[in-house]
Image (tube, rainbow, N blue to C red):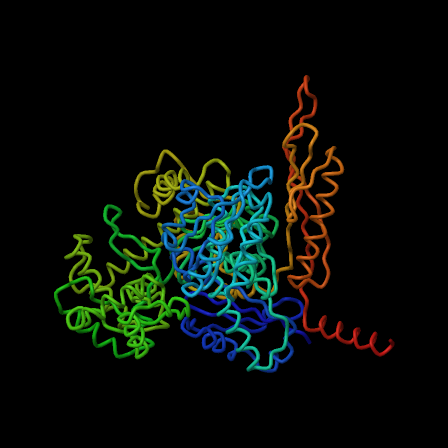
């Protein structure tokens, strides 16, 4: 008997499932994610599975939303970006200044033109000096050169100098993206560098946990396009896992529900991810997925990833009124569940004059070695203080102002996390959930509602009433989900971009939800219905609390499949290895057909041999990448997008072609590895 172990590490929960050889779920478990030491939460989930089955695991596959969450929340490790041939306008357009700050960006002469010809030489002395100056302060380097996808020579040379001068990880832009667009490519490679330490910590935690339980099977991870790669490949290109969790949830939702055509919504602790699925597979987006405020050049499933989850902070948003997310906080119900002593503090705060630091506790979140090494003494002291447990910021503001300010800086750096009132707390108040401390949720609702009324003039709730504010929060969550579903539907129709879809969705949501808000009123002149031909498949831990009301409001068929709360972990073991390589062929001048390869441009005198060379090279590279990523074997499919015109004077005029080779195959399992070892032993013995 063989089994497949799926693990999903999210912002709040870590899930583990066992599937049999028919890919049916035979056991499932959940445990709280322990961000400070991920192995504790991973081990907690695995230990709830049958030990006898674990000994027969053939493949372990991992998905995670931690990388998605870090992008949405704007958190990550300190990195340095080396930019060759970028001007000031391109650097500003990349968003790197807002993401990293100017100190992390090094602008160097160099780069190439659109034809792959060098603009000027790299300054070796300046490059080496920048690398040596930045290396002690960062966790990784990111490199991007102007038109690096047309000729990666300068990126490769900078990488060689980094590898010579230090031992920090380094990634080049041409390795991650094949499209033009220097600013977005620079942003993508910077995001990749920021994620390396996070993904490395996750993989090491899984390996330690599996080894302690004698699980000896290949370890794979889901990419954002729904395919698998081995963990060695993931460490080189972690940005590819930025939508790992959402991609796995879509695969799991379709498998668990039995629907091949559906709208899938996955609600977790930090984000809600929405995808439209047809034929059992979500559509791939080759222009990058929108993740929070960023659109990295990552080939991924077309998905709406928004900062709305069970642990999203409920706050005052100025002119917007009540706002939920995108910042994740620790729910008060969870904090008191893990640290019962804070319940007495919350009980006392109910009777105090409202102020902003009430219900606010801080605790450790994530240990990043490069960030910790740069902490000043007061922040390091605050970090050590947090090791003893949550810090009450109300008391710190009154008695230890220095500690309070240092903790705030740790939170901005992603090392600490605050508590706050969340949808999870509201669900506990209303009896929709009961797995954590209901008393803490009730106390928190009363304190939070007084803050909103007295500090911001928001709400008209009766003092001491916890249910009315909790109901308003839950209604806000439902309305927001409805709006985002409609936005995703408008965008899927291909008629408008995110900005326009957002504005129109606000109006359409109000009209579509008319019957929920005014069930006995006069009928509307419009009868709007969302997705009449597609069921809504909702998965994720909070899904059962919110989506029945969402479905009633929008008038859609709802499917809450069995094991919906662990759909990500199920989807993690259903994927295949798949690698794509794109090669561009252009005609820069009449009669010259240029193939842009990693070794530099190569020219041909006619288009047919140029296309043939691109196909052969792309097929070879895709097959090599698939085998390197962990496939047992792979098949290659070729496709081509042409940019050409035909007219009576010039005939067929070729401008450019994009050749794509996709190599796909099943992942290597423990049985495959044992068979390969036996075959090698037999060959050796025969020789």
Residue 559 is at least partly visible in this image: no
Specify whether 425 is left or right of 600. Answer: left
Quadrant of image for the C terminus: bottom right
Residue 444 is at least partly visible in this image: yes
- The residue located at (49%, 74%) in the rendering is 42
* Quadrant in the rendering for residue 470: bottom left
- The residue located at (70%, 22%) in the rendering is 651
In the image, farthest residue toward the right: 686
**Where residue 43 sits in the image (x, y, percent)?**
49, 77
- The residue located at (68%, 55%) in the rendering is 664
**Where residue 614 sits in the image (x, y, percent)?**
70, 43
Specify whether 362 is left or right of 496. Answer: left
Quadrant of image for the N terminus: bottom right
Specify whether 506 is left or right of 154. Answer: left
Nearer to the camera, 459 or 668: 668
Up/down of 518 relative to 127, above or below = above
In the image, farthest residue toward the front: 125
* Quadrant in the rendering for residue 366: bottom left
**Where residue 188 sits in the image (x, y, percent)?**
49, 51
């Amino acid at each position: 008997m063989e089994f497949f172990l799926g693990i999903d590490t999210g912002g709040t929960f870590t899930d583990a499932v066992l599937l049999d050889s028919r890919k049916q779920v035979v056991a499932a478990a959940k445990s709280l994610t322990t961000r400070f030491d991920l192995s504790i939460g991973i081990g907690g989930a695995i230990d709830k599975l049958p030990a006898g089955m674990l000994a027969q695991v053939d493949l372990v596959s991992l998905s995670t939303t931690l990388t998605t969450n870090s992008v949405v929340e704007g958190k990550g490790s300190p990195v340095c970006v080396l930019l060759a041939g970028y001007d000031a306008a391109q650097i500003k357009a990349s968003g790197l200044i807002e993401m990293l700050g100017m100190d992390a960006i090094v602008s160097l002469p160099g780069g190439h033109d659109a034809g792959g010809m060098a603009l000027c030489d790299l300054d070796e002395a300046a490059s080496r000096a920048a690398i040596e100056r930045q290396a002690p302060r960062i966790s990784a380097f990111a490199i991007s050169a102007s038109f690096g996808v047309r000729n990666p020579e300068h990126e490769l040379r900078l990488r060689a100098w980094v590898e010579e001068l230090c031992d920090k990880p380094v990634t080049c832009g041409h390795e991650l993206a094949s499209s033009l667009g220097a600013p977005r490519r620079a942003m993508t490679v910077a995001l990749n560098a920021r994620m390396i330490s996070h993904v490395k910590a996750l993989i090491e935690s899984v390996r330690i946990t599996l080894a302690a339980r004698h699980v000896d099977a290949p370890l794979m991870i889901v990419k954002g396009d729904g395919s698998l790669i081995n963990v060695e490949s993931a460490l080189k290109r972690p940005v590819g896992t930025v939508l790992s969790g959402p991609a796995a949830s879509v695969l799991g939702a379709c498998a668990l529900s039995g629907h091949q055509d559906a709208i899938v919504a996955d609600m977790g602790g930090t984000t809600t991810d929405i995808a439209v699925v047809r034929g059992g597979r979500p559509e791939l987006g080759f222009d990058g997925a929108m993740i929070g405020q960023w659109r990295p050049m990552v080939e991924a499933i077309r998905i709406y990833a928004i900062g709305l989850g069970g642990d999203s902070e409920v706050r005052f948003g100025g002119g917007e009124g009540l706002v939920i997310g995108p910042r994740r906080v620790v729910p008060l119900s969870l904090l008191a569940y893990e640290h019962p002593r804070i319940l007495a503090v919350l009980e006392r705060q109910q009777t105090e004059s409202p102020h902003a630091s009430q219900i606010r506790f801080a605790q450790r979140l994530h240990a990043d070695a490069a960030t910790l090494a740069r902490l000043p003494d007061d922040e390091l002291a605050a970090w050590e203080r947090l090791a003893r447990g949550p810090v009450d910021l109300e008391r710190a503001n009154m008695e230890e102002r220095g500690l309070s300010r240092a903790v705030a800086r740790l939170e901005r750096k992603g090392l600490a996390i605050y508590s706050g009132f969340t949808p999870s707390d509201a669900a506990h108040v209303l009896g929709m959930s009961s797995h954590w401390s209901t008393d803490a949720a009730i106390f928190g609702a009363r304190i939070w509602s007084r803050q909103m009324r007295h500090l911001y003039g928001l709400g008209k709730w009766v003092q001491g009433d916890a249910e009315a504010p909790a109901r308003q929060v839950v209604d806000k969550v439902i309305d927001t989900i409805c709006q985002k579903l409609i936005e995703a539907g408008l965008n899927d129709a291909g008629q408008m971009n995110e900005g326009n879809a957002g504005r129109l969705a606000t109006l359409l949501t109000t009209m579509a939800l008319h019957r929920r808000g005014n069930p006995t009123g006069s009928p509307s002149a419009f009868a709007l219905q969302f997705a009449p031909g597609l069921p809504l498949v909702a998965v994720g831990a909070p899904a059962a609390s919110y989506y029945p009301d969402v479905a009633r409001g929008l008038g859609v068929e709802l499917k809450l499949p069995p094991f919906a709360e662990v759909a990500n972990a199920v989807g993690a073991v259903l994927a295949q290895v798949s690698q794509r390589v794109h090669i561009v062929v252009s005609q820069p001048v009449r009669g010259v057909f240029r193939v842009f390869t990693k070794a530099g441009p190569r020219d041909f005198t006619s288009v047919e041999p140029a296309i043939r060379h691109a196909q052969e090279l792309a097929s070879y590279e895709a097959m090599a990448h698939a085998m390197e990523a962990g496939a047992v074997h792979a098949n290659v499919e070729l496709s081509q997008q042409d940019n050409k015109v035909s007219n009576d004077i010039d005939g067929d005029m070729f401008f450019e072609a994009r050749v794509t080779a996709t190599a796909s195959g099943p992942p290597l399992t423990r049985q495959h590895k044992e068979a390969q070892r036996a075959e090698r032993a037999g060959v050796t013995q025969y020789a």
